[in-house]
Image (cartoon, rainbow, N blue to C red):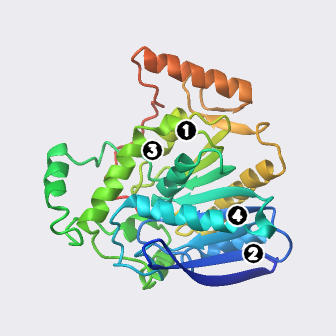
Amino acid sequence: MEMEVEYGEEFISNSRGVQLFTCRWLPVSSPKALIFICHGYGMECSSFMRECGTRLACSGYAVIGIDYEGHGRSGGARCYIKKFDNIVNDCDSFFKFVCGQEEYKNKKRYLYGESMGGAVALLLHKKDPKFWNGAVLVAPMCKISEKVKPHPVVVNLLTRIEDVIPKWKIVPTKDVIDSAFKDPLKREEIRSNKLIYQDKPRLKTALEMLRTSMSLEESLDEVTLPFFVLHGEADTVTDPEISRALYEQASSLDKTIKLYPGMWHGLTYGEPEDNVEMVFSDIVAWLDKRVSGNQYNIYTRVTDPSYGDKLVTMTPSSAAMERQKRQRMRVNGSKYLCGWKGKKMPYHSAM
């Protein structure tokens, strides 16, 4: 990271009058493209996402982040999500404001979402399908694992009381920090970050996350933007099968998946340094190819059993054929899913 990076902070007001914290990491020269960070549940940008922002800025990208309402240095009840749409609308408004600035008008625009931020990124794309040039999705929360999906009776019961005690911290969860970040020293750094929410989820927050995940799960085939989804195979916070399902079902012509054996949920921070370097090298390589215009002549790992586990070149025509194949299979009543199976592990609530 020899390149010099300029860091800046600013507070803005959302449509509800809440002060939101925003920050940016800029290369000294004109950026290759814009990258907008969507952080995970309970997380924040200025400290936790600093390494991510710095690395990407050192690679020539302008990186812009925002703390959601109730998160990090933004105002609002701590980690209370009254409506998931509020997060999406706040990000949409701020990100498009930045894109409209004179120096950025002709730059390509990419979303970067980690965990719950992956859901935010996909919903931003769904809100305006033609606006974004692509997305990097790190262990995204875009489907509820069958291993942890709550029983409909439980959901119904909680829904009846959510407007009575919406902010109550009554949702039982295991310690996500212990489950997400492999490196013990980095785990303690995260635990000492007072901007990160480490209490039990609030009732309405948990239900909003559940509804959002279930809604995304039902519309994965509506994803059309280029994306790179990365996931640790030993992740017990968000199931790697979620990323496989996204990859298989998305209608995107340009889509890439990479699964990292032995890695946990915190791919970009909680792993040993060599692993973190590898992940960011893959991310920057994916971005650089698209910014330079080589969008389709790339190698993509395909998990369809008809291909086997090998690298193949996905062109617009071959991707379109795969999309038609999936549509025919859905019409015939078959479910088009990956079919890779690993050891069953206890999955915790998504960050």
Q: What secondary structure is found at the residue carrying circle 3? A: helix
Q: For this rendering, which residue is in front, 188 or 44? A: 44
> What is the distance, in whole Å, between disc 1 and disc 2 at their CAs?
31 Å
**Distance of label 4 from label 3 (alpha carbons):** 30 Å
Q: CA distance from mark 3 to mark 2?
A: 32 Å
Residue 183 x/y as whole percent: 50, 71
Between circles 4 and 3, the one closer to the viewer is 4
Residue type beneath disc 4: Cys
Counting residues from the N terminus, which is met first, the one under dot 1 or under dot 4?
4
- Amino acid type indicated by mark 1: Tyr
Quarter holding residue 94: bottom right
Looking at marks 4 and 2 on the same chain, the residue that comes earlier in the sequence is marked by 2
Residue at 78% across, 59% down: 107
> Label 3 belongs to which residue?
242
Residue 260, visible in the rendered structure: no
Q: Position of residue 87 (x, y in %)?
A: 45, 64
- Mark 1 and mark 4: span between their CA atoms? 28 Å
Give the image quarter of residue 334.
top left
Left or right: 214 with respect to 37? left
Q: Nearer the viewer, mark 1 or mark 2?
A: 2
Q: Nearer the viewer, mark 1 or mark 4?
A: 4
Q: How many numbered discs, if any?
A: 4
The dot on residue 26 is 2
User: Which amino acid is tagged 3?
Assistant: Ile
Secondary element at image label 2:
strand
Q: Is the Cβ of the residue at disc 4 closer than 8 Å to that at disc 2?
A: no
Looking at the image, tell me whether mark 1 or mark 3 is earlier in sequence order.
3
Above-or-below relation of 85 to 148: below
Provide the residue designation for mark 1: 247
